[in-house]
Image: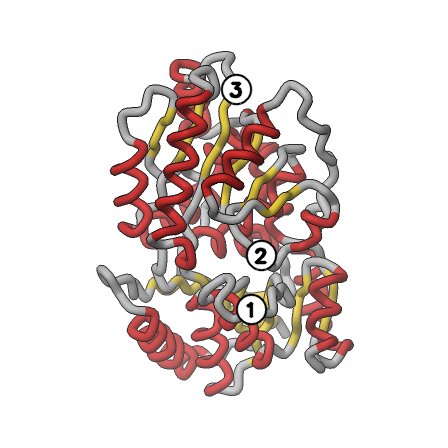
Amino acid sequence: MKKTLCFVFGTRPEAIKLAPAILKARDDERFNVRVVVTGQHREMLDQMLSFFGIKPDVDLALMRPNQSLAGLTSRIITGIDELLQSEKPDWVLVQGDTTTVWAAAVAAFFNRVAVGHVEAGLRTDDKYQPFPEEINRRIAGQIADIHFAPTDWARDNLVREQIPAERVSVTGNTVIDALHWTVARNKENPPQETKAIQDWLQAHVGADPFVLITGHRRESFGAGFQNICASIQQLAADDPKTHWVYPVHLNPNVQQPVKQMLANLPNVHLLDPQSYPAFVAMMHACKFILTDSGGVQEEAPSLGKPVLVMRSTTERPEGVQAGAVKLVGTKQEDIVRECRAMLSPNAKAWPQASPYGDGRASERILDLLAEAK
């Protein structure tokens, strides 16, 4: 008998990382597939669904302007609870560390539906770094019936927390599956948004080097983003021939300081959030990446791109240990110093290999679900 897998997600990163598993599961005769989205990142989520050709079976559309985490959580639990009462899938699959992840896991627990946690076991051991993601992951980890850890380190974290070892499997990270799929498509049959960003880079950057920037972490709102923007101001003024390309997250707490401090600088380019294939093309073309993103820490090493992470800690230390990622925090002097070192003609060579898998994580996850009792 086929097992019914209910994939629940709400943000752009979740969509990217679950898409390869969803696409493979839909072609797998062992499974029926249901896709449920909460709409936590409405516009950016819809971009990802369109690119991967995934149409949700259920769209809860829970996004509200200026919503609190508590308000969002209550709507997710209620919406998923009502869905599970009527549908009763065999498994609920969640990915990562968003509010959607732990709220959907709780709703599944209330309905006695088994939970599979993709990208399980990441930890900083600081409940406020990243906030609220560290606690989101821990709650999901206590509920999950099977844990798909991306690395040995993540597995060891779960075992240390008394999760039975037989319930934890190292699969690699599905983001590498998505990255390989996207790189191949950009090469063989690039979508229009990839062509558009490549044309834009040629027109506005040309042969000059550029640094790709992303930033969205809640713990950096306020003073952190002020420091980040001041750093970019200083670096852009010091080196007019290096460009700084920044697709700006839609959150008003990001938009306000970035546009106030960085608009109208000749070699700083503020863009709207980019589709995933366009962003992959930008990563491939840039000199290095300045970010606070978790996914970028995983993707960039597979493309051979150095990453400076504007955080004081990371739940993905494998990249740091491999020398492909460096933590620089959010102090202006630290960001400026490390970026200058990267731009120096004598900059060190960075490792070209990724510690996050071989692009077959989705296959392993589906095999484990098929075998699970």
Q: Which residue is mark 1?
A: 126
- Pick the residue in front: 313 or 66: 313
Q: Which residue is mark 2?
A: 313
Q: At 34% across and 31% down in the image, what residue appears?
A: 270
Q: CA distance from mark 2 to mark 3?
A: 28 Å
Q: Are marks 2 and 1 in contact (CB under 8 Å)?
A: yes
Q: Mark 3 falls on what kind of element? A: loop
| Nearest to viewer (mark 2 / mark 3) | 2
**Residue 34 seen anywhere in this rendered image of the structure:** no
Q: Which residue is mark 3?
A: 209
First along the sequence among labels 2 and 1: 1
Give the class, few, some or many, for how many residues have Cα within 10 Å of label 2's Cα (few <14, many ≥20): some
First along the sequence among labels 2 and 3: 3
Residue type highlighted by circle 2? Thr
Task: Estimate the x, y position of residue 129 in percent, counting from the top left.
Answer: 51, 63
Give the class, few, some or many, for how many residues have Cα within 10 Å of label 3's Cα (few <14, many ≥20): some
Task: Estimate the x, y position of residue 264 in percent, counting from the top left.
Answer: 27, 25
Q: At 63% across and 55% down in the image, what residue appears?
A: 316
Q: Is residue 1 above or below residue 13?
A: below
Q: CA distance from mark 2 to mark 1?
A: 9 Å
Q: At 45% across and 67% down in the image, what residue appears?
A: 132
Q: Mark 1 falls on what kind of element? A: loop
Task: Estimate the x, y position of residue 347 in percent, counting from the top left.
Answer: 67, 26
Give the class, few, some or many, for how many residues have Cα within 10 Å of label 1's Cα (few <14, many ≥20): few
Residue type highlighted by circle 3? Pro
